[in-house]
Image (spheres, rainbow, N blue to C red):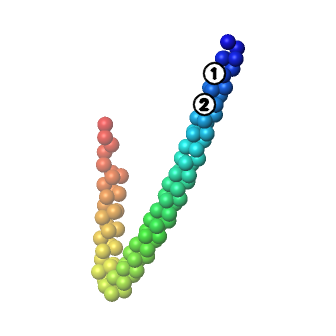
């Protein structure tokens, strides 16, 4: 009977060892997939930053072009925006508080 218990125990140990090997392989695969996902995310963030930088430079160039070619209109638009923001700030500062 004791020998039968040893055989069963050896089978269990072997089964557990095989399962540990399988789980180790799965963990390694998941680690590799996570690493690839992080690399893809970093690449996407760099592309997004590069596109944002290009768009900002284009916006600045367009604004400079319009200011050079239509200076009076640029001043009027700037004054209108400043007046609108000042009126909004005054209205928000002087309105009665909500209850």
The label on residue 8 is 1
* Residue 10 in the image, given as x and y percentages of width and height: 66, 26
Which quadrant: the C terminus? Answer: top left
9 versus 14 height, above or below? above
Which quadrant: the N terminus? Answer: top right
Given residues 57 and 90, the one toward you in this image is 57
In this rendering, position of residue 20 left or right of residue 96: right
Mark 2 is surrounded, within 10 Å at the Cα level, by few (under 14), some (14 to 19) or many (20 or more) other residues, namely few
Given residues 80 and 57, the one toward you in this image is 57
25 versus 9 height, above or below? below
Q: Residue furthest top?
A: 1
| Identity of the residue drawn at 60% across and 35% down | 18
| Tag count | 2
Q: Earlier in the sequence, mark 2 or mark 1?
A: 1
In this rendering, position of residue 88 left or right of residue 11: left
Given residues 64 and 75, the one toward you in this image is 64
Task: Give the CA distance from mark 2 to mark 1.
Answer: 10 Å
The label on residue 15 is 2
Q: Is residue 56 shown to the viewer in this render?
A: no
Residue 90, picture quadrant: bottom left
| Identity of the residue drawn at 55% across and 43% down | 26
| Identity of the residue drawn at 36% across and 84% down | 65
* Residue 97 in the image, given as x and y percentages of width and height: 33, 43
* Residue 44 in the image, given as x and y percentages of width and height: 46, 62
Tell me the element at label 1. helix
């Amino acid at each position: 009977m004791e020998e039968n218990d040893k055989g069963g125990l050896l089978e269990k140990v072997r089964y557990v060892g095989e399962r540990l090997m399988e789980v180790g392989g799965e963990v390694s695969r998941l680690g590799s997939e996570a690493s690839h996902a992080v690399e893809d995310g970093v690449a996407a963030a760099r592309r997004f930053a590069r596109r944002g930088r290009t768009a900002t430079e284009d916006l600045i160039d367009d604004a400079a072009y319009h200011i050079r070619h239509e200076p009076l209109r640029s001043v009027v638009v700037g004054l209108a925006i400043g007046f609108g923001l000042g009126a909004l700030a005054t209205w928000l500062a002087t309105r009665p508080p909500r209850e």
